[in-house]
Image (cartoon, rainbow, N blue to C red):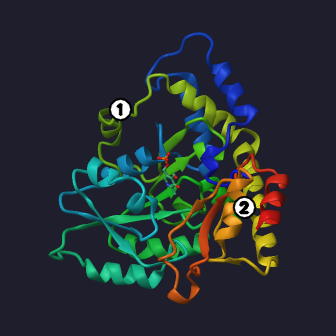
Amino acid sequence: MRFASDNWAGVPDEISAAIARAGTGFAPAYGNDPLTARVTERFCEVFERKVEVLFTATGTASNSLALAAIGRPGGQILCSTEAHIENDEWGATEFQSGGVKLATVANAAGKIRPDGLAAALARYPEGNRHGPLLGLSLTNATECGTVYAPAEIAALTAPLKARGLPVHCDGARFANAVAATGASPAELTWKSGVDFMSFGGTKNGCWAAEAIVIFTPGVLHDVAARRQRAGHTFSKSRFVAAQFEAYLENGNWLHWARHANLMSDRLRAGLRASNSVRLAWESSANEVFPIISRAALANIRAAGGFCHEWPADALHPDARPDPDETLVRLVTSWATSDADVEEFLALV
Ligand SMILES: Cc1ncc(COP(=O)(O)O)c(C=O)c1O
């Protein structure tokens, strides 16, 4: 019943075995090893085009270093009000970029609303007095467990493209978005106007493997130098590469993400069927947001279960929890079992 986060889960054997295999012998350091080169080729196959791949240790590093590389003095990057870069990264993008500002855009359950984006673009026309607009960051799967389909991404990226501005995707849970939409990695990114992304492996089964993936050549300025100065250039790059090789091999990443999403589907179905619980919003990836009684939460915790309480201020006032209720976030992973789901539902 550990639904606190997908990064509470351990690591599948395939990943551990790959690290152990990479641990013998010698190999050139700092990304000049054959395994890193092979994995870069794998990324090109997965995305059906030539891509540049820079490993980092964390999703926060990928987001902030990549976004800093589109920075200009006084600039603004648009993102959803729910974005991890806005709420949870302690100003990492602002810090790495030397002061770029994040400007938030209205969203519906984590997904940027086209009318919110239009309003933001109107607020920052070219030559405005607030500073240059630098681009847009969207998250897929979103922080609310919802997903964007390719057409929805294309509708958001089009007005940015019309102004010659780049688009970033925070893909900490990209595997869950691919699994939930059934769209291809290419359709969810560059084919829909995404120029660069943060590709996450850690939440879906890796020990610690994250990467900046660049689709549009030249879109990021000095990103390798920024990574070096931030201390995210791995000397033993082959160990990150080993994780990604096993992750992408035989569709493992999608197999694990489908399992995580399926466990969330079961939670959603069980919670919908209960008359003592309601879902705060519908989601389709591996995060579920029910409003449950505080008594149920106490039962869950007493039984050794974990889940985080979640802010409810994004909800319409009529939809917010009553005083004896609370909104919680449940996150499933490759390691969630049917028994975890059943036990949770029984306690609720
Ligand atoms: C949507 C999203 N982006 C980025 C991150 C950052 O990942 P990390 O904790 O590895 O910095 C997280 C982690 O929770 C996340 O949920």
* Image coordinates for residue 103, horizontal then vertical, percent: 32, 70
Depth check: give the residue in front, 32 or 344.
Answer: 344
Indicate the quadrant containing the C terminus: top left, top right, bottom left or bottom right.
bottom right
Circle 2 residue: 299
**In percent of the image, x 31 and y 51: which residue is there?**
68
Indicate the quadrant where residue 43 lies: top right
Foreground: disc 2 or disc 1: 2
Most extreme residue toward the left is 129
Distance from mark 2 CB to nearest ligand 1 atom below 8 Å: no
Image position of 260 with respect to 156: above or below: above
* Image coordinates for residue 252, horizontal then vertical, percent: 74, 43
- How many neighbours does mark 2 have within 10 angstroms: few (below 14), some (14-19), or many (20 or more)? some
**In percent of the image, x 18 and y 77: which residue is there?**
128
Indicate the quadrant where residue 16 lies: top right
Distance from mark 1 CB to nearest ligand 1 atom below 8 Å: no
Circle 1 residue: 231
**In percent of the image, x 44 and y 58: which residue is there?**
195
Number of on-image labels:
2
Depth check: give the residue in front, 61 or 309.
Answer: 309
* Image coordinates for residue 136, horizontal then vertical, percent: 39, 66
SS class, disc 2: helix
Give, as a three-letter code, the residue at label 1. Gly
Indicate the quadrant where residue 225 lies: top left
Give, as a three-letter code, the residue at label 2. Asn
Q: Is residue 72 left or right of residue 189?
A: left
* Image coordinates for residue 98, horizontal then vertical, percent: 22, 50
SS class, disc 1: loop
Label of residue 294 in the image? none
